[in-house]
Image (spheres, rainbow, N blue to C red):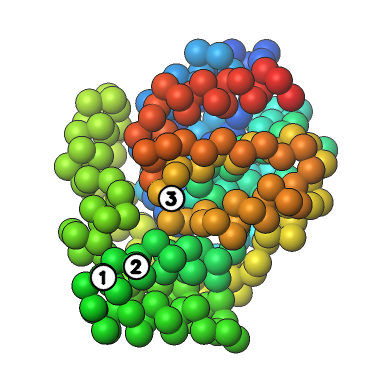
């Protein structure tokens, strides 16, 4: 297991591939998930490029957040830049999944000289619009079943003037029971767990790693910058940008996809059919192919 000291914190990271090629840095989602589930894909990409993948501060194998501390989105962005410096990498390509897509976008805008290109993997760029994307995916099902409680909740989230924080918090209360998950093409948990068990050799995870998830999310959800709308940042990125999005993804909905198409410079969108949020799990070969093709072409 490899650790690096960033801003006085021990950060767990994985490294694959040759250092003399383009470097991809994987920014995981969750928020608070870890890079563990991406290990197999990182190894695949490492056959072609240099890949860095790490657990964000406060998550899983990295140092836990102390009690009473605060955490904001921009702390994580700054630590990513400090990791680049500590590893001696001149510049790299942020590859952000879900919440990591927010980090990738902010990073590219904040550190353009450290960024060669950007890859967004089913990204979350706006808490408000992600909340509404979840509603747009689930509301038709609730209307078909005449579920008045859930219909009311969904319509509250679509209400004009609702704050991003309130909309996001309400979206976390939408009842994604088994039939809804099937309707929305959400990954079957047993299949996902089997993927992890089959593709990731001994992750060397101690019991204390699992308890960090909730504390990380709570502190991040208390931070005002988590609820900012970062979509306008897309127009400020002058490096090549790739959006990979699953056909049924509920994080990056139609509004975000259209916004990216209209406002991103050097932007390219690839929609993976028959995929939802975890395209690197659902279509791993195609996912690798898209990223390699983009890096070769930019």
Q: Is residue 73 left or right of residue 188?
A: right
Residue 25 lies in quadrant = top right
Tally of marks? 3
Element at badge 2?
A: helix
Residue holding disc 3: 249
In the foreground, 151 or 165 = 151
Residue holding disc 1: 144
Residue holding disc 2: 140
Quarter of the image for the N terminus: give it: top left
Element at badge 1?
A: helix
Q: Is residue 231 above or below residue 114?
A: below
Discs 1, 2 touching: Cβ within 8 Å:
yes
The span from disc 1 to disc 2 (Cα, nearest Å) is 6 Å
Mark closest to the chain's N terminus, 3 or 2 = 2
Element at badge 3?
A: loop
Quarter of the image for the C terminus: give it: top right
Mark closest to the chain's N terminus, 3 or 1 = 1
**Residue at coordinates 50% horizontally, 46% vertically from top-left?**
122
Neighbour tally class for label 3: few under 14, some 14-19, many 20 plus, Cα within 10 Å: many
Residue 44 lies in quadrant = top left
* Name of the residue lying farthest toward the front: 144
Q: Is residue 2 left or right of residue 263?
A: left
Q: Position of residue 61 (x, y in %)?
A: 39, 44
The span from disc 3 to disc 1 (Cα, nearest Å) is 20 Å
């Amino acid at each position: 297991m490899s650790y690096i000291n960033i801003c006085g914190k021990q950060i767990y990271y994985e490294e694959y591939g040759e250092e003399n090629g383009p470097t991809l840095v994987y920014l995981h989602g969750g928020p608070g998930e870890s890079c563990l589930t991406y290990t197999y894909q990182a190894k695949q990409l490492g056959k072609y490029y240099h890949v860095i993948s790490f657990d964000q501060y406060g998550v899983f194998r990295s140092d836990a957040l102390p009690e009473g501390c605060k955490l904001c989105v921009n702390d994580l962005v700054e630590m990513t830049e400090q990791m680049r410096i500590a590893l001696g990498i001149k510049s790299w390509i942020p590859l952000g999944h879900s919440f990591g897509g927010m980090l990738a976008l902010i990073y590219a805008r904040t550190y353009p000289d450290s960024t060669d290109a950007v890859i967004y993997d089913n990204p979350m760029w706006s808490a408000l619009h992600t909340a509404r994307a979840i509603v747009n995916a689930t509301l038709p099902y609730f209307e078909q079943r005449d579920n008045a409680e859930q219909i009311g909740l969904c319509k509250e989230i679509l209400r004009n003037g609702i704050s991003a924080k309130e909309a996001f918090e309400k979206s976390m209360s939408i009842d994604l029971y088994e039939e809804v998950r099937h309707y929305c093409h959400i990954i079957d948990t047993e299949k996902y767990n089997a993927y992890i068990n089959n593709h990731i050799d001994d992750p060397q995870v101690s019991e204390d790693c699992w308890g960090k998830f909730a504390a990380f999310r709570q502190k991040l959800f208390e931070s005002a910058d988590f609820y900012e709308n970062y979509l306008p940042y897309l127009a400020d990125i002058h490096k090549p940008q790739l959006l990979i999005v699953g056909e049924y993804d509920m994080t990056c909905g139609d509004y975000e996809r259209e916004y990216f198409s209209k406002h991103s410079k050097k932007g390219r969108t690839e929609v993976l059919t028959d995929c939802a949020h975890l395209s690197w799990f659902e279509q791993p070969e195609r996912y690798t192919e898209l990223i390699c093709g983009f890096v070769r072409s930019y």
